[in-house]
Amino acid sequence: MAGHGPLTSVDEHLGRIIDAVEALPPAVVPLSEALGLVLASDVVSRLPLPAFDNSAMDGYAVHQRDCIGASAESPVHLPVVGGIGAGAAATEELAPGTAVKIMTGAPVPPGATAVVPYEWTDRGAHEVQIFQQPVVQQNIRRAGEDVDEGDLLVSAGTVLGPRHLGLLAGAGEGRVAVRPKPRVVIISTGSELREPGQPLGPGQIHDANSTLLASAARAAGASAFRVGSVTDEPGTFLETLQDQLSRADVIVTSGGVSQGDFDVVKAALRDRLWFGGVAMQPGKPQGFGTIDGIPVFTLPGNPVSAYLSFQLFVLPALRKLQGRTRLVHPLREARCSKGFGSPVGRRQFVRAAYDAGLVAPVGGHGSHLLGDLAAANALIVVPEQTGEVQAGDTVQVLLLDEEY
């Protein structure tokens, strides 16, 4: 389904993609496998945290009223009638006028209204001298003061980090329902391509795209499978594609989507996917559709075009598959230190270096310039109607490495 006529806008093409993609079905996994994944449903606490009253200090559990007036000059003397360690039970009520040695995290015995820390005592074993008066409830962690039973622990859509997992573990949750990592298959096309590390013959180049795109997919939280390069022969390409569908949630190809005689992807899939021009620079030739329910992105072959297309179109789809709520890169404003021209009618994405509200273009505009791409940490986004950016202008910037 080749596109004809005027160029498609960036927003229209992105909308087509977002509409075609749904979040992956939830999977229940152990907490140890949930880091970085998106929670599929709310988790509500099934017990209070702390689960019982416990001591915040090593010291002595007492009736606070027995310690009124305690000082270094006039210590309170109390008999020590027992000890409670962490993990022990505390079922016997503390009698007035007595003390129990207690460790941090140990359950506070019924009746006790304060814990006197060791530092305020002589640390007596059979009788303790208390040199400072505690206040009621001092050094006692009350059951449910952190989280009560029925409280929302973590809401659906949260990207689970170490602190979330620690909370879930503390609340007794051993497994959670999450959206799994999307499985992304990367295929480069071109008879001229050779694996990095291999010697080059006449007219050959190393395949940078599959490494570039697989790395970008992994950085986006996906599992990436790099197939490598396929020659410019439609039958070979279709066979490779068909073999990969069974293990993919997304397939991304690069190359073979323009107007050349050897554009293998377009030739092989023109009746199954949409192909057309998108009003952007770089990255005009694009293709997208689904095959057997699997989204297939056909990106341009020039490395810069392929990478920018991934950031603009593939990344939002991966985030939707993951169940994330923010799909597209946020834009921020910055002051541009150097002027440049831009083609009217296309949204231009200029490789740039951003720092503390200032941004400057990096290198040239060529879509083959990998060195400039590696030196950039941002893109200046120039609207379709703007033909020139002058030094000092405020521009919109997309930060390539920003978490969002």
Image (tube, rainbow, N blue to C red):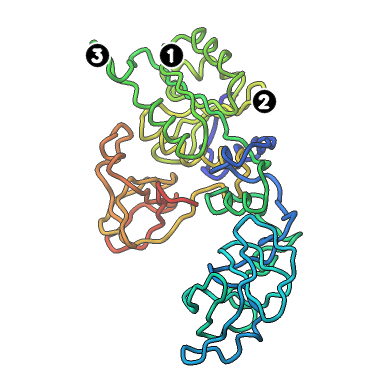
Q: Residue at x 58, y 24 (%)?
A: 248
Q: Earlier in the sequence, mark 3 or mark 1?
A: 3
**Mark 3 touching mark 1, by CB under 8 A?**
no
Rendered position, 185 above or below 353: above
Label placed on residue 293: 2
Horizontal side, residue 203 vs residue 174: left or right: left
* Structural crowding at the residue carrying mark 3, measured as other residues with C-alpha within 10 Å and reported as few (<14), some (14–19) or many (≥20): some
Label placed on residue 230: 1
State the separation of the CA atoms marked 3 and 2: 38 Å
- Image coordinates for residue 291, horizontal then vertical, percent: 63, 22
- Residues 82 and 110: in front is 82
Secondary element at tag 3:
loop
- Residues 201 and 212: in front is 212
**Type of amino acid under label 3:** Leu
**Type of amino acid under label 1:** Val
Secondary element at tag 2:
loop
Horizontal side, residue 358 vs residue 8: left or right: left
Horizontal side, residue 4 vs residue 396: left or right: right
Q: Which residue appears farthest toward the front when viewing the image? A: 126
State the separation of the CA atoms marked 2 and 1: 23 Å
Rendered position, 172 above or below 297: below
Label placed on residue 283: none
Number of disc labels: 3
